[in-house]
Image (tube, rainbow, N blue to C red):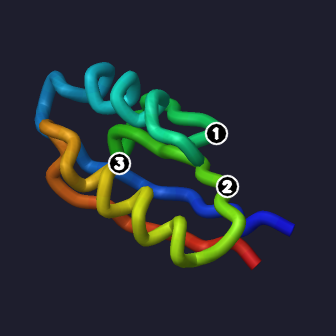
Amino acid sequence: MPVVIYVLIVSEIGKESEVRKALEKIKGVTEAKTVYGEYDVVARLETPSLKELDEIVTTMRKIPGIIRTVTLISA
């Protein structure tokens, strides 16, 4: 059973769409949406294990325009 993760992302002003498009290209990201409120983008990930999660989140944090992330692992 895969691990399902949600990542809440704060981006630089005006970079929301660029961040979302970059996220959609990452293996393991099943969905990325621009949202309004405290966070700018929400991404849904599925990975076979937490090791892959670490690799994906590390890749995500390197995307230009991302300021901060919050990772939520579903139970």
Decide which of tag 1 and tag 2 comes sooner along the chain.
1
Q: Is residue 74 above or below residue 47?
A: below
Q: How many marks?
A: 3
Q: CA distance from mark 1 to mark 3?
A: 18 Å
Question: How busy is the neighbourhood of tag 2: few (under 14 within 10 Å), some, or many (20 plus)?
Answer: many
Q: Which residue is mark 3?
A: 39
Residue drawn at x 58%, y 77% as measured from the top left: 50
Q: CA distance from mark 1 to mark 2?
A: 7 Å
Q: Secondary structure at mark 2?
A: strand
Residue type beneath disc 2: Glu
Residue 46's tag is 2
Q: Foreground residue, 35 or 16?
A: 16
Residue 30's tag is 1
Decide which of tag 1 and tag 3 comes sooner along the chain.
1
Query: Residue 6's x, y, as percent?
Result: 56, 58
The reply to whether the C-beta atoms of the residues labelled 1 and 2 are less than 8 Å apart is: yes
Q: Is residue 56 left or right of residue 73?
A: left
Q: Secondary structure at mark 3?
A: loop
Query: Residue 51's x, y, as percent?
Result: 52, 76
